[in-house]
Image: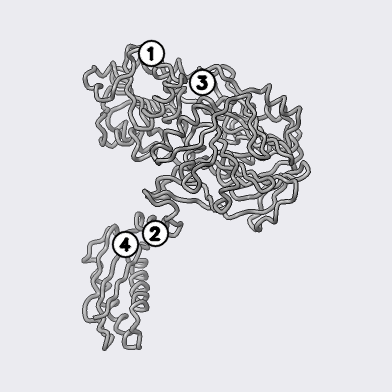
Amino acid sequence: MSHPHPDLQLPGPLAPGALRIVPLGGLGEVGRNMTVFEYDGKLLIIDCGVLFPEDHQPGVDLILPDFDYISDRLNDIEAIVLTHGHEDHIGAVPYLLRLRRDIPLVGSQLTLAFLEAKLKEHRINPNLQPVSEGQRRKFGAFDLEFVAVNHSIPDALAVAVRTPAGSILHTGDFKMDQLPLDGRITDLRAFARLGEEGIDLFMVDSTNAEVPGFTVAEREIGPVLDGVFTRADGRIVVASFSSHVHRVQQVLDAANAHGRRVALVGRSMVRNMTIAAELGYLHVPDGVLIDVKKIDDLPDDRVVLMCTGSQGEPMAALSRIANRDHRVSVGPGDTVILASSLIPGNENAVFRIINGLIRLGAKVVHQSNARVHVSGHASAGELLYCYNIVRPKNVMPVHGEIRHLVANGALAVSTGVPPERVVLAEDGVVVDLIKGKARIAGAVPCGYVYVDGSSVGGVTEAELKDRRILGEEGFISIFAVVDSSTGKVVSGPQLHARGVAEDDAKLAEIVPELTKALSEATAGGTADTHQLQQVIRRVVGRWASTRLRRRPMIIPVVVEA
C-alpha cells in the first residue's frame, strides 16, 4: 500500500487525459469531508462538511476545509455533489458559497432540503439540482450516476463519476442494513453492474473498517427503546443528532405506543424534523407531537423530550439541561437516553454530561449499557462484500482517522487488490489517476480553518496555543513606567495575576529582583521599551517556573514618561 511521505512536494501539472483527486478533509479525521476532482481544467467537488472542535481548540465553533487550493479557481467548479445531509458532509457549503454563490448543488431531495434551510440563515439563495438514485447527470466532463445507499439518515447516495480518464465509485457514508426502517437498502446490484463496467478507483467509507463482522440493524433498537419506555416512571429525554430521522421515528413510535407525547427541543432538531415530516421521510402519529412550552401541563410519565447534544456540545440542549441552564429540567425518576455513538474526541464532554445528569438523579441509558444506537457505517464484513462485488482496479480509503484508513486498505488487499494499487492518502495529498493506475503525485497545503463567532479563518494555531496557555496556566501582567530622559524606572513594576492560583501578595517577592533587572538594563543603556519588556518576560518567566512550577502567559507593559 502506498502511503504519503511527510516530505511530499507540490504536485506538477496534471498530465493530459489524467484525473486528479485532492482530499481537502475527511482523511485522517472523522468529519470535514471534502474531495476535489480535476479533469481538463475543470473541478467537481464531492461533499463539503465541517468538523466539530475538541477540548484543545477552545472558543472554536466549527472547523472548515481549507479552500485555498480552489480559491482562485472558483469559476472552474462544475458542481458540488452532496452524498447526504449530515453536517460533516454539508456544513461547510455556506462558507464556500460565500466565495461563489451560483455553484450548482447536487444531491437528493432531503439532503438539499436540509441544506436549503441552512443557507437561508446565511441569506444565500442556492442553485439546487435535485437527483435521485438511478439517475445520471452530466456536469462538463464529469458524467455522474447516483446509487442508493443505506446510512443513518434517509436519502443517502453513492456517486459514480465517469470521466475520459477512468471511472470512480465514491460510496459516501454507507452501511448494508438488510432490513432498514425505510426499506431503502444499499443497491449492491448497481455496485455489481458498475464493477462489471470497470471501476478504476473505488473510494470507500472507512469509519468502521476496524470493526469485525456486520453492523447491527436499526430494527434491533426498537425493542430496546420499548423496554426503556416500559420501565420509565418519569420524564424521558432522548438525545440524538438533529438529522437522525430514523431514530426520531423510533422514538415517536415508542412514545405513541406508551401513551406519551413528544416535544422537540433545539432549533436544528425542530427545523430538520419539520422538513423531514413535510417531505414524507418522518411519519408523525396523530396527536403525539406537542410544543415544548406545554410539557409542564402534562404529568411527567406522559412526556418525552427529543433533543440535541448527544456529543456533549456545550451549547446544545442536553448540556444545558445537565447544567440546569435550560427551561427543561430532569431529576430523580427521569430517564435520559443518549441515542448516538461517540465521535472520537468527544468522550470527555459526553461523560461529563452523563455524570451531571446522574448527579441530578436521572437514570442515563447510553451505548455502553444498552443497545440504543447502532452505527451508520459498514463494518469490515460489509466492506469485504463490496470489494468482492466491485472488483476495483485501485482503492482509496476515505472518511476516517489514519487507523481506519489503514484497516480499510488491508481489507482491500485481503480480497485480492494488489497492495501497490491501494492508495493511503491524508488531507492535502494529491492522487493522480493515469492510464488506469492511481499514484500519489504530491501534496498541497491543507490546514484547519476555524470559525470563531463571525470570524472565519481569523484564528490561527498560535492563537489557539495562547488560549490553551491562558486556560491552563493563567497569566501575569506587569506594568512599569520608565523616565525617557534618564531611563530610570519611576513607577512600578506592578504585577497582577489571573488564573495562577496565587494572590498578588505572593507576586510581591519578585518585585525587588525585577526592579534590579530593569535598573541594570537601563543603566547599561537599554532604553527601548520592547527590550525592557523582554527583560521583564525573562525574569518573571524564570521565577514562575521555579517558584510556582507554572508557565503562565506573561504580558509586560513598559511605557515612557
For discs 3 and 4, the disc positioned in front in the rendered view:
3
For the residues marked 3 and 4, what is the alpha-carbon distance in whole angstroms? 51 Å
Residue holding disc 3: 218
Q: What element carries label 1?
A: loop
> Image point 66% across, 23% down: which residue?
188
Q: Can residue 214 be seen in this view?
A: no
In which image quadrant can residue 315 be found?
top left
Expressed as whole percent of the image width and height from the top left, the position of residue 181 reads: 51, 17
Label 4 sits on what residue type? Phe
In the depicted structure, whether residue 475 falls above or below residue 491? above
Query: Contact (CB < 8 A) between labels 1 and 2?
Result: no
Q: Tell which of 72 and 285 is nearer to you.
A: 72
> Image point 60% across, 45% down: which residue?
23
Label 2 sits on what residue type? Asp
**Quadrant location of the N terminus in the rendered image:** top right
For the residues marked 1 and 2, what is the alpha-carbon distance in whole angstroms? 52 Å
Residue holding disc 4: 475
Q: Is mark 2 on a helix, strand or loop?
A: helix
Expressed as whole percent of the image width and height from the top left, the position of residue 277 reads: 42, 21
Residue holding disc 1: 285
Nearer-N-terminus badge (4/1): 1
Label 3 sits on what residue type? Glu
Residue holding disc 2: 466
For discs 4 and 1, the disc positioned in front in the rendered view:
1
Q: How crowded is mark 1: few (under 14 residues within 10 Å), some or many (20 or more)?
A: few
In the depicted structure, whether residue 244 falls above or below residue 139? above
